[in-house]
Amino acid sequence: MTPIEVDSYWDLAGLLIVGLVVVTSAVVPAWIAARRTRGLHSDVAEMKSQVVNDHGDRNMREQLDRIEHRQAASADDIRGLRKDFGELRGEVRDARRDHRDFEARVHIAYRREHPGAQPL
């Protein structure tokens, strides 16, 4: 490989232009990326203030896990209440049916004992 020979100012200018293009192609993208991330610092600080608790040593993950556990326990309680209400509804249905049957038997017995009387 032969070394580059600079014989004139035009050769030097050409090398400087090539070098400037190489440096610019490396520096400009880095500069643009730095400008984009400059505003992120305040956004990250704002998110951190929302995630980190100022009122104790518990972090947000622990609090969310505790809330999720309580919600699951409440869901179990609600399932139990639904089951209880379903059973009560069945008991009320049975009581109504028994009442209708009893009322029908009373009417039949009343008509048998008092054939010409007005219905109850």
Image (cartoon, helix red, strand yellow):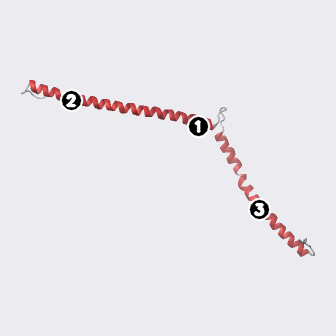
Q: Which mark is residue 64?
A: 1
**Label 2: few (<14), some or many (≥20) within 10 Å?**
few
Tell me: residue 38, above or below residue 9.
above
Q: Which mark is residue 101?
A: 2
Tell me: residue 44, above or below residue 83.
below
**Label 3: few (<14), some or many (≥20) within 10 Å?**
few
**Label 1: few (<14), some or many (≥20) within 10 Å?**
few
- Percent position (x, y) of residue 2? 90, 72
- Disc on the earlier residue, 3 or 1: 3
For label 1, the SS is: helix
From mark 2 to mark 3, how far is it between C-alphas? 93 Å
- Percent position (x, y) of residue 108? 13, 28
For label 3, the SS is: helix
Quadrant of res 45: top right
Tell whether 92 sits left or right of 84.
left
Q: Amino acid at mark 2?
A: Asp
- Residue appearing at x 91%, y 74% in the figure: 9
